[in-house]
């Protein structure tokens, strides 16, 4: 019957982790597709997992074997009432912008809380039930924990590669319901088998299982604190890595599950029987990888994804192997198994709380990953004679810090190029820090010095004027100076002129620019320049433009197109962006706009749905530049909403400039699905004069009901038919609210 236990544990773990990206995808559209939705969901999942482990611990501590099987079977039966899962309908999503964390957690608890808790308790309960039998494996049932993590890993890898590309959300929910039935049946059958074994008849909690035995140091509070810390660090590192990957790439299930999968792999390896993990070598690997992360942050701020993603995932694996390996080494006897898992779950939940709830309130920048990497290095197993504290563990890192400051001053004159100077300084600091690796505390302090030095540089895109962190990320305003060569004749000597501008940034992605000098004034710049595609849209509409809706405010550049008698309504997800755009010390577009203006905060699609039907002449959707693609704004249902709100001759303009994804095929598939006409223009040629005026390359798509609506655009050779975009006919390009595959649009 051991295969029955293994199968039930495997299926239960599969359910726990298959539902996580599925639930995140259900909730993601309601908050604009922001990456923080997933991290907040993880806090909810970790809290529910903790509740499941607490329930399992109480069940085995206070009830006999028969009562345990009966109570848990009843809980699994009650969980059937929550199937199929449904989490959000968007009706109250606008209010969620003011308190998104509470809204997300409430949705998770109400929608899947009870079945999740019941499934979460199944793993530790089955391990405990096996230990109560007379089976030879009863003495060490922890290998079932490895099977559990294998099931979790299988679910995470199956979701982005099998489930998401082939099944709509409703079908995914149905499959999960079938798996829940199978898990419940396997759990009850395993309990029945356990009750028939001889040892099960006398299996009732005793004083020995209710309290630590005298003299057992592993039962002391200090041991529990160690379990807690060893679980906290990799959990926090996993969420920090997830935020690192999704902020400037994409908030999609694949980039959610890769860090979580790496995290689970380390659990599998640590708890698998007869899988030796060299603790010292793993610690050295962690030290080297953390130094590589520190250097990359020093030189690039955010490294290119081609090697940044593997670097961060490898570092996370090293963190997990160090911490989970030490957890496995300290596992207690089977009668205290459920309490052990409870403390691990509590540590994991606290890691999630720190990243998703505490850090955004305490820090103005995203610093939780560097902090936890320093903590992980302090937990590296020390070699013989290197344990304990010495004053040199502080003195040598302090000397390293003094050297970094001195080297910065000396190299400022010797190496005038900023990029080269950063590389030299980072390499010197990393080499000196590597010499401290023999003692974990000393090396961790040295790594902290390197990370602080890396963050001390000015932001690479200019002088920071303002920065604040919200649920939606770090928003920054920078002042930038660039030089442009202007020549009167081709090939002739050019006059060097300077552009001084204010930029609005989220992560490293620019969301708006205003030129401050050289005649820039309040004219729209960057992606919204008058000579670019958006300028052509406003000229084509001309005097018939009366009412316009804009999903995404940015720096408010399009407000400069407003004229008296027009009404511009902006829908902005992040209240901080709305405050910054309205501050004339940073940007004056809104203040100088001559149209009647309204700025509303919340998800653009939800807010747009509250506008009167057939009440707009133009809808501009400008929400795709950050690469965290809000897929719900490009679905079949979204297009239906847009054209329900547009007047018969109205136009939809989509700003699709994106460094990672080519979203034109998605727009083309959605337009073709509704019988609409579309054109696209990649305005990649920017002259020196236009650059002096702040213009940047941009890609726009314009969609109308028929060819007549786009007649004014066809006279320009720049606009190309949207129907001719490659891959437009592929089934995966037509996104719906229940199905999307963003990675299919990844640029080669």
Image (cartoon, rainbow, N blue to C red):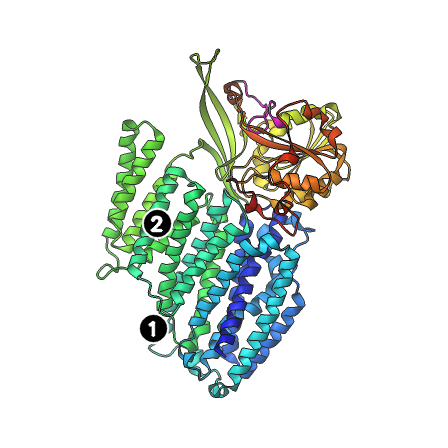
Residue 380 place in picture, x, y as percent: 32, 58
1 shown above or below 506: below
Is 66 a magenta residue? Answer: no
Please tell me which residue is depicted at 43% across the width and 35% down the height of the picture.
459
Left or right of residue 621: residue 481 = left
Which residue lies under the disc numbered 1? 217
Disc nearest the viewer among 2 and 1: 2
Please tell me which residue is depicted at 34% across the width and 45% down the height of the picture.
292
- Residue 635, quarter of picture: top right
Q: Nearer the viewer, residue 286 or 61?
A: 286
- Does residue 606 appear in this view? no
Residue 570 place in picture, x, y as percent: 66, 36
Count of numbered circles on the image: 2
Which residue lies under the disc numbered 2? 289
Is 529 a magenta residue? Answer: yes
Q: What crowding class fits label 1: few (fewer than 14 Cα within 10 Å), some (14-19), or many (20 or more)? A: few
- Residue 382, quarter of picture: bottom left
Residue 50 place in picture, x, y as percent: 51, 65
Q: Nearer the viewer, residue 390 or 734?
A: 734
C-alpha span from label 2 to label 1: 34 Å
Please tell me which residue is depicted at 44% across the width and 56% down the height of the picture.
262
- How would you classify the magenta stretch by its main secondary structure? loop
Please tell me which residue is depicted at 23% across the width and 51% down the height of the picture.
392
Residue 519 place in picture, x, y as percent: 54, 18
Task: Provide the residue span drawn in magenta.
Answer: 517-533
**Reading the chain from its start, which is encountered first: label 2 or label 1?**
1
Left or right of residue 147: residue 564 = right
Label 2: element kind? helix
Label 1: element kind? helix
| Residue 506 badge | none
677 shown above or below 8: above
- Residue 544, quarter of picture: top right
């Amino acid at each position: 019957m051991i295969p029955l236990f293994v199968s039930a544990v495997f299926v239960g773990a599969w359910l726990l982790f298959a539902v996580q990206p599925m639930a995140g995808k259900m909730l993601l559209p309601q908050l604009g597709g922001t990456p923080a939705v997933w991290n907040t969901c993880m806090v909810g999942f970790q809290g529910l997992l903790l509740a499941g482990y607490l329930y399992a611990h109480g069940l085995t501590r206070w009830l006999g074997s028969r009562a345990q099987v009966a109570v848990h079977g009843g809980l699994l039966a009650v969980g059937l009432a929550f199937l199929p899962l449904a989490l959000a309908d968007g009706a109250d999503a606008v209010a969620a912008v003011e308190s998104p964390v509470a809204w997300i957690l409430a949705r998770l608890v109400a929608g899947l809380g009870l079945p999740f808790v019941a499934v979460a308790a199944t793993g530790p309960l089955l391990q405990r039930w096996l230990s109560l039998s007379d089976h030879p494996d009863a003495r060490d049932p922890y290998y079932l924990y490895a099977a559990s993590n294998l099931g979790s890993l299988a679910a995470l890898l199956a979701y982005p590669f099998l489930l998401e590309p082939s099944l709509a959300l409703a079908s995914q929910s149905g499959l999960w319901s079938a798996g829940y039935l199978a898990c419940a049946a396997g759990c009850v059958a395993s309990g029945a088998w356990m009750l028939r074994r001889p040892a099960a008849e006398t299996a009732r909690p005793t004083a020995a299982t209710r309290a630590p035995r005298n003299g057992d140091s592993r039962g002391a509070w200090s041991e529990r604190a160690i379990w807690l810390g060893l679980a906290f660090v990799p959990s926090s590192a996993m969420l920090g890595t997830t935020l690192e990957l999704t902020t400037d790439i994409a908030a999609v299930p694949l980039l959610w599950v890769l860090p979580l999968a790496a995290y689970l792999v380390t659990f599998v390896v640590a708890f698998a029987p007869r899988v030796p993990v060299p603790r010292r070598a793993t610690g050295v690997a962690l030290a080297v990888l953390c130094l590589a992360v520190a250097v990359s942050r020093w030189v690039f701020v955010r490294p290119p994804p081609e090697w940044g993603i593997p670097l961060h995932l490898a570092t996370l694996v090293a963190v997990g192997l160090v911490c989970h390996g030490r957890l496995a080494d300290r596992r207690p006897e089977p009668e205290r198994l459920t309490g052990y898992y409870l403390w691990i779950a509590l540590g994991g939940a606290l890691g999630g709380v720190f990243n998703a709830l505490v850090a955004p309130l305490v820090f103005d920048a995203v610093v939780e990953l560097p902090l936890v990497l320093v903590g992980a290095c302090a937990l590296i197993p020390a070699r013989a004679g290197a344990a304990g504290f010495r004053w040199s563990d502080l003195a040598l890192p302090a000397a390293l810090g003094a050297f970094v400051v001195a080297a910065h001053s000396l190299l400022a004159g010797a190496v005038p190029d900023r990029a080269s100077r950063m590389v030299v300084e980072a390499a010197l600091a990393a080499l000196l820090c590597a010499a401290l690796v023999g003692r974990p505390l000393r090396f961790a302090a040295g790594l902290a010095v390197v990370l602080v030095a890396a963050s001390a540089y000015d932001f690479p895109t200019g002088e920071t004027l303002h920065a604040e962190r919200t649920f939606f990320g770090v928003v920054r305003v920078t002042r930038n100076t660039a030089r442009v060569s202007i020549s009167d004749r081709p090939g002739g000597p050019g006059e060097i002129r300077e552009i001084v501008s204010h930029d609005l940034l989220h992560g490293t992605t620019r969301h708006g620019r205003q030129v401050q000098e050289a005649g820039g004034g309040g004219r729209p710049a960057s992606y919204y320049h008058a000579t670019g595609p958006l300028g052509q849209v406003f000229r084509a509409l001309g005097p018939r433009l009366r009412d316009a809706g804009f999903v995404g405010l940015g720096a408010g550049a399009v407000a400069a197109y407003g004229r008296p008698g027009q009404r511009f309504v902006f829908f902005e997800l992040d209240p901080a962006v709305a405050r910054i755009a309205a501050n004339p010390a940073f940007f004056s577009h809104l203040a100088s706009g001559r149209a009647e203006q309204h700025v509303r905060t919340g998800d653009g699609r939800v807010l747009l749905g509250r506008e009167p039907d057939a009440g707009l002449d133009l809808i501009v959707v400008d929400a795709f530049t950050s690469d965290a693609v809000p897929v719900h704004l490009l679905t079949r249902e979204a297009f239906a909403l847009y054209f329900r709100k547009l007047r018969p001759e109205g136009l939809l303009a989509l700003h699709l400039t994106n460094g990672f994804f080519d979203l034109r095929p998605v727009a083309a598939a959605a337009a073709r699905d509704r019988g609409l006409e579309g054109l696209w223009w990649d305005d990649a040629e920017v002259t020196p004069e236009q650059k002096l005026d702040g213009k940047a390359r941009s890609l726009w798509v314009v969609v109308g009901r028929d060819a007549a609506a786009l007649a004014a655009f066809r006279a320009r050779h720049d606009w190309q038919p949207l129907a001719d975009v490659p891959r437009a006919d592929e089934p995966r390009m037509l996104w719906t609210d229940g199905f999307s595959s963003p990675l299919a649009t990844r640029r080669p």
